[in-house]
């Protein structure tokens, strides 16, 4: 008779990242897990994903890949986790009948963005520092948004050992700055209904080219075709590990190089070097350039040329900063951060492959039916037209629940579960029936009964 011998205990080191990058171009992601055990070494470790704070299953019990189990320590990777959030992780020894360990930290799978450059990018990502108002804080972030603070160093601080402008360094927080809140909220409202993270790494006054390093704030200076890129790269890897690419690399820089009189050809050559490094280190990342009013014509012309020539096979896009201004240098007008956040969102949404879910309500009522489209963490709503038709556009691939409602009516089916993979979904239809009241009609006679 076979006897199964299980470990005495299995302990999970809980997930600390709130957002894991989905496979770029895909709809699932992977999470590396680790922990300890006592007693007999497990043969294998299984994990599953549930909705945060519940037992509702998102991904069933699955064997970890790339397992390592030895000396009281285990690790491995859980793959093919559907994008969305928020989730909890649970682990057990393979085929054990009980759950040995439950995670409690909420996390999800979605889009990770890194925001880099000089102080412009800092204003986009931070609402204030000390007495500086910077990007402002006027809006409330959607619950799907998270931000991690990296170093944002003072102009000319070549070792980044002096003043750090970032009040949230080393912390995951709900963003408050106008720029990232506007950007993230617009992405969610545009149909990207997955968790979205912003990771920041900026240096005030930094340049792209070492030849321009004496332009401001003293010399030598951090430059992006050298140590500054290396530091940003290593910072991102320290968070997410090697082999993970941020979906979007947002770049707002150029003023310092423009002030140094850089030529279009030299700045373009610098972008070529920078993006070649990004393409090699972070394959699949999109490179988003923010045009600068104050960077000069040569820098902006190099941006335009980089976008049109598709340097190094990277997907480029631009967001125009025209109309931005300073109201108390070095503070940026908060409306500028809002403007750029919105334009970046438009750019990102235009690069997304998006889909449509559509259908018709027929029966006892057609027009004015509220239709909700719910994905993990977010709900969109619309109302049917006079002929009962409705549609949701700009949706990312993923799973959605479509639910109709209107006072005085029931619907069949009560809801539909739709999974968007590589094409639009049509025919998500419902039939409406009027709810009858508690009245009835009677004809005939009742013997011995008086009805008043």
Image (cartoon, rainbow, N blue to C red):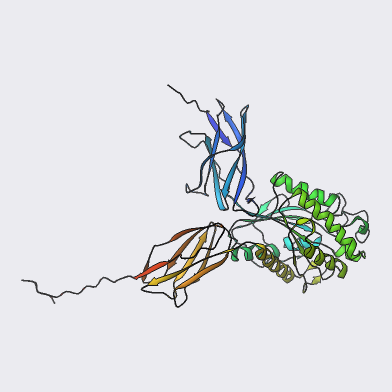
Left or right: where does residue 223 sit relative to residue 95?
right
Residue 80 visible, this orientation: yes
Left or right: where does residue 44 sit relative to residue 359?
right
Residue 256: x %, y % from top left: 88, 63
In which quadrant is the N terminus drawn? top left
Residue 187: x %, y % from top left: 63, 63
Left or right: where does residue 305 sit relative to residue 29?
right
In which quadrant is the C terminus drawn? bottom left
Quadrant in which residue 188 is drawn: bottom right
How many marks the image carries: the answer is 0
Quadrant in which residue 38 is drawn: top right
Q: Outermost residue toward the left?
A: 448
Q: Depth check: give the residue in front, 369 or 213.
A: 369
Q: Outermost residue toward the top?
A: 1
Q: Residue at 61% across / 56% down in the picture?
A: 195
Q: Residue at 60% across / 51% down in the picture?
A: 109
Residue 415: x %, y % from top left: 43, 61
Q: Depth check: give the residue in front, 315 or 335.
A: 315
Residue 130 visible, this orientation: no
On screen, residue 283 above or below 140: above
Residue 353: x %, y % from top left: 62, 61
On screen, residue 364 above or below 280: below
């Amino acid at each position: 008779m076979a006897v199964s011998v299980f470990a005495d205990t299995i302990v999970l080191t809980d997930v600390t990242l709130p957002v894991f990058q989905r496979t770029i171009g895909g709809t699932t992601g992977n999470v590396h897990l680790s922990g300890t055990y006592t007693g007999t070494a497990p043969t294998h470790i299984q994990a599953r994903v549930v909705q945060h704070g519940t037992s509702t299953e998102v991904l069933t019990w699955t064997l970890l890949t790339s397992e390592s189990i030895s000396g009281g320590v285990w690790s491995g990777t859980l793959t093919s986790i559907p994008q969305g959030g928020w989730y909890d992780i649970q682990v057990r020894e393979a085929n054990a009948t009980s759950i040995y360990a439950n995670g409690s930290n909420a996390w999800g799978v979605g889009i990770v963005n890194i925001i880099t450059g000089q102080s412009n990018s800092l204003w986009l990502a931070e609402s204030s520092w000390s007495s500086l108002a910077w990007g402002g804080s006027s809006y409330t972030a959607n619950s799907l948004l998270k931000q991690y603070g990296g170093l944002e160093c003072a102009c000319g601080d070549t070792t980044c050992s002096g003043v750090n402008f970032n009040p949230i360094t080393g912390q995951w927080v709900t963003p408050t700055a106008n720029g990232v809140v506007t950007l993230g909220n617009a992405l969610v409202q545009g149909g990207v209904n997955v968790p979205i993270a912003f990771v920041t790494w900026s240096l005030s006054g930094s340049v792209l080219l070492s030849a321009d390093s004496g332009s401001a704030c003293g010399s030598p200076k951090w430059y992006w075709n050298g140590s500054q890129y290396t530091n940003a790269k290593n910072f991102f890897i320290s968070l997410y590990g090697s082999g993970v690419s941020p979906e979007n690399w947002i770049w707002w820089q150029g003023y310092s190089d423009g002030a140094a009189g850089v030529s279009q050809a030299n700045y373009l050559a610098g972008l070529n070097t920078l993006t070649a490094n990004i393409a090699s280190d972070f394959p699949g990342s999109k490179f988003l350039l923010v045009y600068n009013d104050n960077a000069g014509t040569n820098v902006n012309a190099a941006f335009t040329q980089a976008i049109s020539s598709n340097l190094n096979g990277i997907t480029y896009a631009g967001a125009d900063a025209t109309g931005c201004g300073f109201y108390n240098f070095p503070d940026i007008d908060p409306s500028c951060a809002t403007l750029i956040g919105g334009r970046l969102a438009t750019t990102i949404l235009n690069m997304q492959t998006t889909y449509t879910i559509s259908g018709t309500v027929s029966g006892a009522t057609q027009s004015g039916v509220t239709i909700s489209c719910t994905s993990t963490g977010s709900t969109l709503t619309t109302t049917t037209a006079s002929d009962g038709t409705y549609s949701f556009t700009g949706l990312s691939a993923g799973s959605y629940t479509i639910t109709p409602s209107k006072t005085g009516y029931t619907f069949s089916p009560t809801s539909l579960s739709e999974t968007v993979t590589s094409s639009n979904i049509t025919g998500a239809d419902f039939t409406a029936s009027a709810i009858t009241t508690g009245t009835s009609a009677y004809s005939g006679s009742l013997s011995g009964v008086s009805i008043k």
